[in-house]
Image (cartoon, helix red, strand yellow):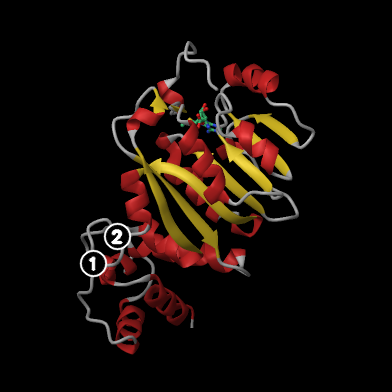
């Protein structure tokens, strides 16, 4: 259990989990038994303590040096490696695919998610705690207000499940909004270069959400090419980015490459 006297650092997104049932449920849905696991932001080790017992190996990245001695005294195990460093600044490099489990620091949620996607061939599954609103954006369907670059990117790469909602009372200090656990099971055989190019294409398509797709694409492709590709796909010239699902985007992406 965590030490409630330790002052949480707001600027590092520290909201420590204090609810045992929620921690058990995270372990259950993350399916990490005998797997190689990465944890981002172990904090005082609320999830780490259980991860280390179930996983084959666990590497945890924690930016806050004050957490390191707490973790080292609490968590024993030859399968545990603790790295005192900013996850975003680390080059990732290993042989076997790993599962990622994290109660994410909310101030860098999307930077972390896109870093994982830039290294997709290193991961098989990701179980993350995010603000509920982010979980809803990740799984949003086209033509809804939540639908965004994040939705298309995640749905292109993974089977997604919003597992359960976690109320503020399960954390110390309490965040202002509900959180949710969401799992992304990554598709197999994703080619990293293809993924990078596709994600970049989606970034261009959604660069201005209120503009038409045509206007967003104009920054990168010629007018004639855009008109040609829209026509092949039977799309109106004034179609908006939020009107297409990931499969339709992949088709457009391939047509622009040709
Ligand atoms: N896992 C713990 C728990 O569930 O109680 C703590 C979760 S807390 C929401 C986020 C953790 O991420 C904090 O321990 C914080 O220090 C750490 N953190 C913040 N930014 C980080 C970064 N760039 N790299 C690694 N860890 C980071």
Q: Is residue 192 above or below residue 2?
A: below
| Residue 104 seen in render | no
Q: Is residue 240 above or below residue 45?
A: below
Q: Residue at x 37, y 50 (%)?
A: 135
Q: Is residue 243 above or below residue 138?
A: below
Disc 1, ligand 1: is the CB inside 8 Å?
no
The N terminus lies in which quarter of the figure? top right
Left or right of residue 39, residue 136 in this image: left
Residue 119's x, y, as percent?
Answer: 60, 54
Query: Count of labels shown?
Result: 2
Give the distance between the C-alpha atoms of the residues marked 2 and 1, in whole angstroms.
7 Å
Nearer-the-camera pick, 40 or 193: 40
Q: Residue at x 29, y 30 (%)?
A: 176
Q: Is residue 175 above or below residue 7?
A: below
When asked about the image quadrant of residue 211, the answer is bottom left
Residue sitting at the far top = 5
Residue 82's x, y, as percent?
Answer: 69, 30
Q: Which mark is residue 147?
A: 2
Residue 231's x, y, as percent?
Answer: 30, 87
SS under mark 1: loop
Q: Residue at x 22, y 81 (%)?
A: 236
Asked if the residues shown at circle 2 and circle 1 are in contact, with their CB atoms under 8 angstroms apart, the answer is: yes
Left or right of residue 146, residue 55 in this image: right
Residue sitting at the far right = 78
Nearer-the-camera pick, 130 or 200: 130
Q: Which mark is residue 111?
A: none
Left or right of residue 173, residue 237 in this image: left
SS under mark 2: loop
Residue 227's x, y, as percent?
Answer: 30, 82
Q: Residue at x 35, y 75 (%)?
A: 222
Q: Badge 1 is on which residue?
A: 143
């Amino acid at each position: 259990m965590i030490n409630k006297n330790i002052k949480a650092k707001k600027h590092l997104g520290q909201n420590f989990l204090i609810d045992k049932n929620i921690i058990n449920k995270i372990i259950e849905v993350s399916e990490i038994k005998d797997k190689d696991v990465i944890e981002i932001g172990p904090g005082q080790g609320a999830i780490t303590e259980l991860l280390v017992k179930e996983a084959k190996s666990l590497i945890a990245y924690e930016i806050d040096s004050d957490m390191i001695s707490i973790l080292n005294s609490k968590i024993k195990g030859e399968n545990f490696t603790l790295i005192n460093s900013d996850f975003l600044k680390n080059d990732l490099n290993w042989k076997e695919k790993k599962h990622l489990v994290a109660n994410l620091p909310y101030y860098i949620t999307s930077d972390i998610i896109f870093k994982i996607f830039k290294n997709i061939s290193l991961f098989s599954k990701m179980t993350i705690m995010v603000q509920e609103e982010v979980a809803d954006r990740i799984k949003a369907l086209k033509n809804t207000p939540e639908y965004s670059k994040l939705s298309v990117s995640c749905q292109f790469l993974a089977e997604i499940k919003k597992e359960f909602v976690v109320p503020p009372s399960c954390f110390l200090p309490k965040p202002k909004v509900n959180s949710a656990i969401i799992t992304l099971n990554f598709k197999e055989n994703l080619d990293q270069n293809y993924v990078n190019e596709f994600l970049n294409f989606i970034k261009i398509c959604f660069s201005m959400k209120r503009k038409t797709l045509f206007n967003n694409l104009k920054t990168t492709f010629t007018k004639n090419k855009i008109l040609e590709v829209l026509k092949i796909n039977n799309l109106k010239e004034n179609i908006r980015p939020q009107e297409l699902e990931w499969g339709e985007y992949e088709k457009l992406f391939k047509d622009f490459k040709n």
